[in-house]
Image (cartoon, helix red, strand yellow):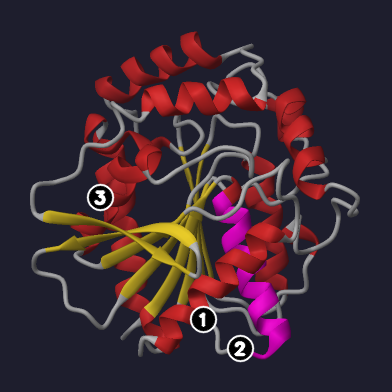
Amino acid sequence: MSISLQARFWYFILRTTFKGQRLTVAENRAQQAKNAQMMNRIPASVAFERTSIAGLPSAWLRPAAAGREKVILYLHGGGYVVGSIDNYKMLCGQMAHTLQTNLLIPEYRLAPEHPFPAAVEDAQEIYRWLLAQGYTPENIIIAGDSAGGGLSLATTLALREAGDPLPGAVVCLSPWADLTLKGSSHQTKAKVEAILTTEGLREWANFYAGAENPANPLISPVYADFHGFPPLLILVGSDEILLDDSLCLAEKAKSAGVKVTWKVWNGLWHVWPALGEFVPESRQAFEEIGAFINHQRK
């Protein structure tokens, strides 16, 4: 299936804007703060409320018709060094609206100021807070994109090792799951990648891993043992250098007996659902997530 004209347009814009761009962490954060003015659009039916949970800035996105018993814990991307609520209002607002489910997005601590395991600790703390509020594990979905996808996996693995009850499912959009950067798609997809560079990812991986081995499964979940893991959905674009992260992740989880749904979206780029209402493929991805979650709850 060919991609939409809107997606073709935005692929050109993103590639023109980001390809070959090398910014410092401070410059990236400044650029994201500027971009947030475009990314803060949410459907009128979704209420937005800022709060603080476990000392972390957080926000609820609540569709008017959503019940209170189910929640998506969304962990944002940004290479573990950038990312904020404001940058993710459009993605999270559209996801909450399409799934008609309350969504909670925290701002976990970022590297290089707070390297591993800060992000994993923060995500676990938020999950446990949800349990303390009365949400049952099967009604909590942990989801995330890019680094947030990897963090969703790492958080669930850490919860399993700690003996906590696990979420009903995990959803990953274009997950960054191998910070050793060994996937062959770093070479085979370099020419079509619209946003990321392997060099930039290597710098961010070093910031996040710090003194730890990047092959630590809580840093690079492709090296994890997935026994006992909840159902897993992975959506990834065909034209991204992190394609092999998803492929390796799906194969590793399946070999451990995990129920894995993995789909490559032809012609699409890294975390395309971030463009929300601007491309129809975003809504289609959210509908696919909704179908996956509903299937797990039957």
Q: Which mark is residue 164?
A: 2
Q: Is residue 271 visible?
A: yes
Circle 1 Cα neighbour tier, 10 Å, few/some/many (<14 / 14–19 / ≥20): some
**CA–CA distance between discs 1 and 3?**
23 Å
Classify residue 197 as left or right of residue 43.
Answer: right
Identify residue type, mark 2: Asp
Q: Quadrant of the N terminus?
A: top left
Classify residue 28 as left or right of residue 141.
Answer: right
- Looking at the picture, does residue 236 appear above or below residue 109? above
Classify residue 292 as left or right of residue 254.
Answer: left
Instruction: Please state the extent of the stretch shown in magenta in the rendering.
Output: 148-163
Say what secondary structure mark 3 lies in: helix
Name the residue at 59% across, 65% down: 122
Circle 3 Cα neighbour tier, 10 Å, few/some/many (<14 / 14–19 / ≥20): many
Location of mark 1 (residue): 128
Name the residue at 53% across, 21% down: 194
Q: Quadrant of the C terminus?
A: bottom left
Residue 151 falls inside the magenta stretch = yes
Residue 215 falls inside the magenta stretch = no
Q: Are marks 1 and 2 in contact (CB under 8 Å)?
A: yes
